[in-house]
Amino acid sequence: MLRYHEPAPLTWERFLADAQGNISDSDYRLLTIIPEGKDGGNGFLKKWYAVNAKVSDAVNAQRKANLGRDDVGPVVLREYEIERVANAAMNAKNPLEAEIILMKFGYDYLESAKGLEPFSENALLAYALQLRILLRKDSFTAEKGNEQYEKLFGIIQNEMNME
């Protein structure tokens, strides 16, 4: 079982190795295309990518509004929960907190979308996607964040010195 507040119990490669031969070839093919962001014609994956696109669109619309840019795209009625998550991400204290909010939303969405049958294709795909979220979450550390900050700060300093 996966839990959002715990580290990923295995790597993506280990998960695929364990799955191979223990699930159908078609299910295994679906697992292998997940890192590419493809849905393979699967309804569950299509819904997952659609939800991610809605969240991304809502966050981008709020970014545009915060920058004072008019959104010239079509009027989109967004779902309350999508808007709530986008608002929370945009009001986060820093980009890491915003990313954590978005990952938690995705994880929770998958938890509710997988259904009640533990050995279904949807449950397998939800597990795989949740594992990827945990692996991404585990990749964020204070040390890596500080390294990235120093790198970006150095670039900005160099650009300012060149002017």
Image (cartoon, rainbow, N blue to C red):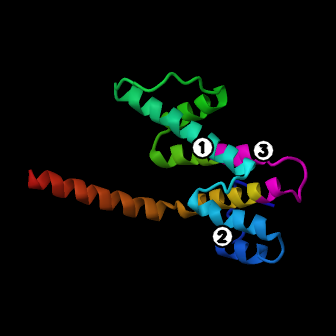
Q: Where is residue 38 in the image (x, y as percent from the top left)?
A: 61, 56
Q: Residue at x 62, y 32 (%)?
A: 82
Amino acid type of disc 2?
Trp
Give the mark nearest the N terminus, 3 or 2. 2
Q: Which residue lies under the disc numbered 1?
A: 52
For the question of whether residue 48 can be seen, the reply is yes
Q: Taking 18 as reference, is 61 left or right? A: left
Q: In the image, is residue 55 part of the stretch drawn in magenta?
A: no
Looking at the rendered structure, the secondary structure element under dot 1 is helix
110 in the magenta segment: yes
- What range is drawn magenta here? 104-124
- Can you identify the residue that label 2 sits on? 12
Q: Is residue 135 visible?
A: no
Residue 113, disc: 3
Q: Position of residue 126 (x, y in %)?
A: 75, 54
Q: Which residue lies furthest to the left in this view?
A: 163
